[in-house]
Image (tube, rainbow, N blue to C red):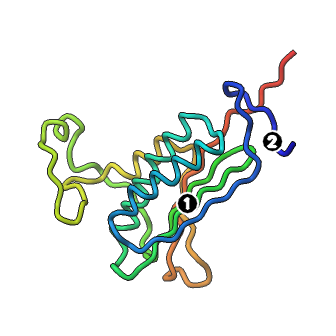
Amino acid sequence: MNARPGPFAGQVRPRFRHLERCYPAFPAIVGLSRSLVSTHAHSWGLPADITDSLGRCVSELATNALAVSGPLDLIRVRLQAFPSCVLLSVYDVSPKKPEASAPDLTLAELDALPDVEDPLGFPEFGGWGLPLVQALADVTGAHWLDPVPESGKWVWARFDFPPQVTGA
């Protein structure tokens, strides 16, 4: 058997698994990516908390990729499961470094507003995406394609499994 028993609720740590999809830069990819990643993470037997975090994070990363992409650009979503972690990556063509910004509003102010979105589907107020991903993931980063950074980048988030429990 290629998988090792894990410390979470009788589940088994996944052997290497890989999923990758390429989408045109269109607002529907945010929901598609979330469904795709959540469905595969669940079918791979990943813990529920990690599966939930992956769905939230791919939505944020895909939204950010969409915001820096043109209508003819492609966005890639990649999910890789290893015995010790899961790696979620989203590719966009922009060479711009992803940076966490201060949210436009506090949660209390945002909660008090009616649900209004612009015609492109982006919320009126932003700034929550990368801080949310950084809070949910164990490690985050970006990798530019070499040798030409202008070719785009992968923005990624890694979710570690708890260490193996060895018992008596």
Label 1 neighbour load within 10 Å: few <14, some 14-19, many 20+: many
Numbered badge on residue 3: 2
Amino acid type at image mark 2: Ala
Q: CA distance from mark 2 to mark 1?
A: 23 Å
Which residue is nearer to you in this view: 119 or 87?
Answer: 119
Image location of residue 158, percent across then percent down: 59, 49
Residue 11 placement: quadrant: top right
Q: Quadrant of the C terminus?
A: top right
Which circle's residue, 2 or 1, is located before the other in the chain? 2
Residue at image location 50% in from the left, 76% down from the top:
152
Numbered badge on residue 138: none
Q: Is residue 154 above or below residue 163?
A: below
Which residue is nearer to you in this view: 49 or 110?
Answer: 49
Circle 2/circle 1 CB separation < 8 Å:
no
Amino acid type at image mark 1: Ser
Q: Is residue 82 left or right of residue 32?
A: right
- Kindly state the secondary structure of the residue where label 1 is placed: strand
- Kindly state the secondary structure of the residue where label 2 is placed: loop
Residue 51 placement: quadrant: top right
Which residue is nearer to you in this view: 33 or 70?
Answer: 33
Image location of residue 78, percent across then percent down: 57, 61
Q: Quadrant of the N terminus?
A: top right
Q: Is residue 110 left or right of residue 4?
A: left
Image location of residue 70, percent across then percent down: 34, 79
**Residue linked to disc 1:** 89
Q: Is residue 71 above or below residue 116?
A: below
Residue at image location 60% in from the left, 44% down from the top:
159
